[in-house]
Image: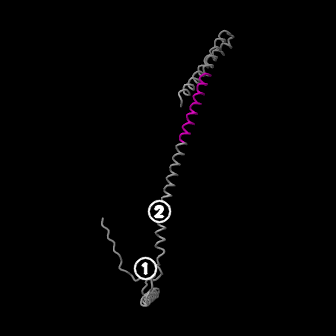
Amino acid sequence: MNTKTMEGLVGARTNMELLNTPFRVFKEARRKGDTETMKRAMGYVNDFSDKAQEYKEEADVGMEEDAKAAREREKLEREKAIEQRRKEREELEARTEENKDTDKDAEKSANKTTNKEADTVEVSEDGKVLLKQSVDAQHTDFDQSTSVNPQNVTGNEPVTYTAVGAVCPPAQAPTISVSV
């Protein structure tokens, strides 16, 4: 807060409070009918109100200066923010250009390799036979594991099931030792 604003507000408030005393004297004198005391009291009231008005004007000037300074600070902050965004945009554009250059270099090298023939894989007859045997073996293992033998499953023993729903053979029970 500007010193003019503070001084103006304090001065105006003080003079308005000081105005109460002569005004009270004026009322008392009017009640008694004492015109001389009334005139003297009204002179003090006018003096204090004039001083309060002067301090009010000083406070108004101070508030205008505060507003002007605040607008200038805001303008400077806005300019700084604009400059910072401009720098960020330039850096981003530079990085984008740099990435485009590296992408073009990578694309050129990729074009050189794409002109060559692609590698191909051929599976021999022996490999096809081995693949078929391994698939058949897995299929028969699955058929055997899916069949449930009710004699092996009892209500007293815990049973573990596989992901496909087959019963797994009971494994050795894990042991837990706790020491305190």
In the image, farthest residue toward the left: 179
Q: Earlier in the sequence, mark 1 or mark 2?
A: 2
Q: Secondary structure at mark 2?
A: helix
Q: Position of residue 143 (x, y in %)?
A: 47, 88
Q: Position of residue 130 (x, y in %)?
A: 42, 89
Mark 1 to mark 2 CA distance (whole Å): 56 Å
- Give the vertical position of 167 relative to 24 (above or below): below
Q: Position of residue 50 (x, y in %)?
A: 63, 19
Which amino acid type is marked by label 1? Thr
- Give the vertical position of 113 relative to 136 (above or below): above
Q: Residue at x 48, y 81 (%)?
A: 165
Q: State which region is magenta.
A: 53-77
In the drawing, does residue 82 fall left or right of residue 28? Answer: left
Decide whether the magenta segment is chiefly helix, strand or loop. Answer: helix
Q: Residue at x 51, y 51 (%)?
A: 90
**Residue wearing tag 1:** 160
**Residue wearing tag 2:** 102
Q: Residue at x 46, y 81 (%)?
A: 120
Does residue 146 show up? yes
In the drawing, does residue 19 fall left or right of residue 139? Answer: right
Q: Residues within 10 Å of mark 2 (few under 14, many from 20)?
A: few
Q: Position of residue 3 (x, y in %)?
A: 53, 27
Q: Magenta span has 61?
A: yes
- Give the vertical position of 155 relative to 179 (above or below): below
Q: Nearer the viewer, residue 59 or 149?
A: 59
Q: Secondary structure at mark 1?
A: strand
Q: Residues within 10 Å of mark 1 (few under 14, many from 20)?
A: few
Which coloring applies here?
A: one colour
In the drawing, does residue 68 fall left or right of residue 162? Answer: right
The image quadrant that residue 39 belongs to is: top right
Which amino acid type is marked by label 2? Thr
Does residue 141 show up? no
